[in-house]
Amino acid sequence: MKHLELIYRNSDSKLTTLRLTYAQENLTEATTKKAMHDIAALKMFDNNGVNPYVEPVSARYVETNTDPIFDTRSAS
């Protein structure tokens, strides 16, 4: 499964990641930067007095592969 990770600097100057599971693939740098700036401009998030999304730092797609060893959920 492919995820989109948007990495921001928070109001404490630490990095925070916003992970989106159902994101459009093949986003351009310009589109992604604009969306990240739009999210930051909302200033609607607060985590114990810290705004987690202040300054866009980077964006990337991350693909996760699962290799099951066993799964008893399907056994009768």
Image (tube, rainbow, N blue to C red):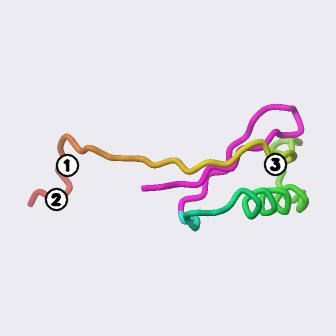
Image quadrant assignment for residue 70: top left
Q: Which of pointers 2 and 3 indicates the residue nearer the eye?
A: 3
Which residue type carries mark 3? Answer: Tyr
Point out residue 1 in the picture as x, y percentages from the top left corner: 42, 56
Residue 35, image x, y percentages:
78, 63
Q: Does the magenta stretch include residue 37?
A: no
Q: Residues within 10 Å of mark 1 (few under 14, many from 20)?
A: few
Q: Do the residues labelled 2 and 1 touch (CB within 8 Å)?
A: yes
Classified by dominant secondary structure, the portion drawn in magenta counts as strand
Outermost residue to the left: 76
Which amino acid, mark 2?
A: Ser
> In x, y percent, where is residue 39?
81, 60
Magenta span includes 2: yes
Q: N-terminal of the two: label 1 or label 3? A: 3
Q: What residue sits 36% from the left and 47% below the top?
A: 65
Residue under numbered circle 2: 74
Which residue is the site of mark 1? 71
Residue at 69%, 50% in the rendered image = 6
* Three-letter amino acid code of the residue under disc 1: Asp
Q: Residues within 10 Å of mark 2 (few under 14, many from 20)?
A: few
Start-end of magenta stretch = 1-21
Q: Where is residue 69 in the image (x, y as percent from the top left)?
A: 20, 40
Please tell me which residue is depicted at 86% across the width and 45% down the height of the picture. 55
Give the Cα separation between the discs numbered 2 and 3: 41 Å
Q: Are marks 2 and 3 in contact (CB under 8 Å)?
A: no
Q: Distance between the residues labelled 2 and 1?
A: 7 Å
SS of the residue under disc 3: loop
Q: Please, what secondary structure does the residue beneath circle 1 have?
A: loop
On the image, numbered disc 3 is attached to which residue? Answer: 53
